[in-house]
Every structure is written in C-alpha cells, then in structure tokens.
Image: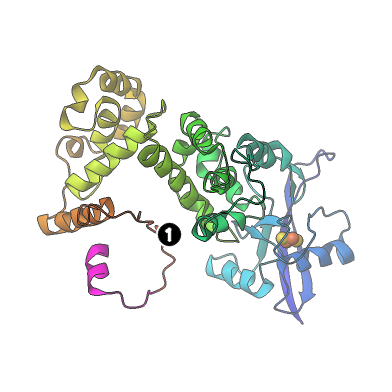
C-alpha cells in the first residue's frame, strides 16, 4: 500500500462559503485509480463528497474531472501516474482534482452536463435519418465508409473535450468539439439522408464549424482518441471542397486566404489575412470595400495589439518570408496535398496534425521529402 494526498475542489451550493480546496491522504495500491482514491475519501473520511461514476472501466464517461489541471477520466488515471505528473509540474506530488470546466458545477466534482454538453449534442440532430428509399432488407454500406466514422463512434460523452475548449470559453454558444464530432459521425455515414443539410447548417451557423481555433486542447483531452478537432476539419473540408459552400461567416474565404499566404510566404502573414479573407484572396483584396469595413470595425483590437506589442507595425508592411529553399519545400507540400503532382488522384490526404512526440519508423524517401 502507498499513501497519496488528494486535494479536492469542494463546492456546496447550499453553503454560504464559496468553493474551497480540501486535502485528504488515502492509502491504496499504486496502480489504483484516482476515482478509487475519491471513493475512499467518500467512504472513510467525508461522505458528503459528490462524485459521479458508474462503470469504473472508462466506458460510461461519467467520471470526467480535471486532474492536476488536465481533463480526463478519474477511473482511467492511475494514482501513481497522477502523483508523478503533479511532481513534474511542481505541485509536490499532491494530486489536484476539480470539476470539468465550461460547465456549471452542481456540487463538488459533479457538473451540469444537461446545461451545456447535452444541449449542444442535441443541436446536431444526433441520430441517423435513413436514406430514401429505405431498402427492403438492410442498407449495404462499404466497409471503408464505416471505418471512417469508427473514430467518432468511440466517443463516450465524458465532456473532457468540452471542459477545456478555448473557443467555447470565449463563446459559450460555440457548438463545441463533442457535438461536432458527433455530427461527423452521421455526415460520414452513407446511410444518412441529410448529409448536405447537416454540413450546410453547421457551416452557416455563426457558432458552428468555423469557430474552432485549432488549439488542439480537445485532441489532448480526449481519453478515447476521438480527435474532435480532426472531425471538425473534415466537416470543413466537406463544406468547402465537396459541397462548395461559401458560408456567411467567411470561414471558407478565411481558410483559403490562410493557405495562400502560407504558400506564398512559407509562414502566415497575419496583417494580410483579414483583408484577403474579406476582400478576396489576392494582394488587391485590401482595396475591396468589404475589407475596408472589416478593418475599420477591428481598429480597436488592432490598436490594442500594437500597444501591447503583439503586433509589429513594420512586420505588417514588410512581411517575413522563409528562405527560398524552405519556401519551395512548403510549396511542395501544398502541391502534393492539392494533387498537382498527380492531377487524377482521387484519394484525399488526411494529414494527422497532432504530433505526440514519438518517433515514427523510417519513412520512404519520397514521404520524407514531402514532410520536410
Ligand atoms: Fe465510467 Fe469512469 S466511471 S468512465
């Protein structure tokens, strides 16, 4: 048996004292989970501790909490790992447990999933609408198509991704990573009859797919490797490349301008991004009245950014550019992904943008060149 100190965020809505931290040492084997530590506190020291759990096997998704500041499942996190992480981040080995973020706390570690998570899931019509005409027997579906949606089907609705979504923090109306991953589950299903309508609604919704800022938080948080951000990117790709939707939120135009600037400069030239997104994807975009209007409405933010040193006015006029050889390497990646090297290529490249830091096995010469 080993001793572990848990520091739990407590909150009782019926008590005049606000939220507070409470420390308790528990005695358990090293491989036991944080959830077991919490349940020991509840059983032996303080029965008033509110914690939600059911399967204790990382299947039901009910024990989502933040452990040492990171969202995850209490039943899937081992006590010894949590303690080692606490030591690594300078918290002295004390395991901090607090409720998930972006959702109101009902009591202690229990958050109101109905108020946020389930409300958003319901926004994306989370069920299959059978393609017409309904076959006499079963729908025959290509195996690859079902494999494509398997990743999203692994979601257990624990809310870990919602907890740390930065876009949702800035805009609570954002549909969010869990619901959008759920949406892809049906958009990618060939049996569904509303593929185009679903994508169109999510693209035109001001709080839809184009509000994600690619911060990777949801990818990191997900205990089931659903990769919600990746599913959002796929929805965007279907909206723009497959269905040709030019949304009212300027999402597609923003994406195109972003890609062109990276292609031209090797890096993003941020000062050009706004005018090109609104005025057209070329150097002349800045002279379009729509770009002028948008620049004017953003003036306050621009001035603030300059005053705080976040924007260098000189850099806005003279953009940084990578050395020619490096720029050409970036352009080669674009050519490869856009299919310029093989115009008849039907396959679409799915770039895995989430790098976890482990070395891949030696790639072939061609792949290495493209990645570089
Ligand atoms: Fe079911 Fe943790 S208790 S996922």
Q: Which is nearer the eye, 96 or 194?
A: 194
Ligand 1 resides in the quarter of the picture at: bottom right
Find the residue positioned furthest to the front: 136
Find the residue positioned furthest to the bottom: 1
- Depicted 77 relative to depicted 105: above or below: below
Report the quarter where the N terminus lies: bottom right
Q: Is residue 186 visible?
A: yes
Magenta stretch, residue numbers: 359-372
Tell me residue 344's x, y (percent).
Answer: 25, 53
Is residue 371 within the magenta segment?
yes
Q: How many marks?
A: 1
Q: Is residue 310 visible?
A: no
The residue beneath circle 1 is 354
Report the quarter where the C terminus lies: bottom left
Instruction: Please identify the quarter of the rendering in which residue 79 is found.
Output: bottom right
Instruction: Please identify the quarter of the rendering in which residue 149 is found.
Output: bottom right
Secondary-structure class at tag 1: loop
What residue sits 81% from the left and 44% below the top?
12
What residue sits 30% from the left and 74% below the top?
363
Tell me residue 16's x, y (percent).
Answer: 81, 38
Instruction: Please identify the quarter of the rendering in which residue 224 is found.
Output: bottom right
**Left or right of 197: which side holds 44?**
right
Is residue 279 within the magenta segment?
no
Label 1 neighbourhood size at 10 Å, few (<14), some (14-19), many (20+)? few
Tell me residue 369's x, y (percent).
Answer: 22, 67
Q: Which is nearer the eye, 248 or 167?
A: 248
**Left or right of 278: which side holds 83?**
right
């Amino acid at each position: 048996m080993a001793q572990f100190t848990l520091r739990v965020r407590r909150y009782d809505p019926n008590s005049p004292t606000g939220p507070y931290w409470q420390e308790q040492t528990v005695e358990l084997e090293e491989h036991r989970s944080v959830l077991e530590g919490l349940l020991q506190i509840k059983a032996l020291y303080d029965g008033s501790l509110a914690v939600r759990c059911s399967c204790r096997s990382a299947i039901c998704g009910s024990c989502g909490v933040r452990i040492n500041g990171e969202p995850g499942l209490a039943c899937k996190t081992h006590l010894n790992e949590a303690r080692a992480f606490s030591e690594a981040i300078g918290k002295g080995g004390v395991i901090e447990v607090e409720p998930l973020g972006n959702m109101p706390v009902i009591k202690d570690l229990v958050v109101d999933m109905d108020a946020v998570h389930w409300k958003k899931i319901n926004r994306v019509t989370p069920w299959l609408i059978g393609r017409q005409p309904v076959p006499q027997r079963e729908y025959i579906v290509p195996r690859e198509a079902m494999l494509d949606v398997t990743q999203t089907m692994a979601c257990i609705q624990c809310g870990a991704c919602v907890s740390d979504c930065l876009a949702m923090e800035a805009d609570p109306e954002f549909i969010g990573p869990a619901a959008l991953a759920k949406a892809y589950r049906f958009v990618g299903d060939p049996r569904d009859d509303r593929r185009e309508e679903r994508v169109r609604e999510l693209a035109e919704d001001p709080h839809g797919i184009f509000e994600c800022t690619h911060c990777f938080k949801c990818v990191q948080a997900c205990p089931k490797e659903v990769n919600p951000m990746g599913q959002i990117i796929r929805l965007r790709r279907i909206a723009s490349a497959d269905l040709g939707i030019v949304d009212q939120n300027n999402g597609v135009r923003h994406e195109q301008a972003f890609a062109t600037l990276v292609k031209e400069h090797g890096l993003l030239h941020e000062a050009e991004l706004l005018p090109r997104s609104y005025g057209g994807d070329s150097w002349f975009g800045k002279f379009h009245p729509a770009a002028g209007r948008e620049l004017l409405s953003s003036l306050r933010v621009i001035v603030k950014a300059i005053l705080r040193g976040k924007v260098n006015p000189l850099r806005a006029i003279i953009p940084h550019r990578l050395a020619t050889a490096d720029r050409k390497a970036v352009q080669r990646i674009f050519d490869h992904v856009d299919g310029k090297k093989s115009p008849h290529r039907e396959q679409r490249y799915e770039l895995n943008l989430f790098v976890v830091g482990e070395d891949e096995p030696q790639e072939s010469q061609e792949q290495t060149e493209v990645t570089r």
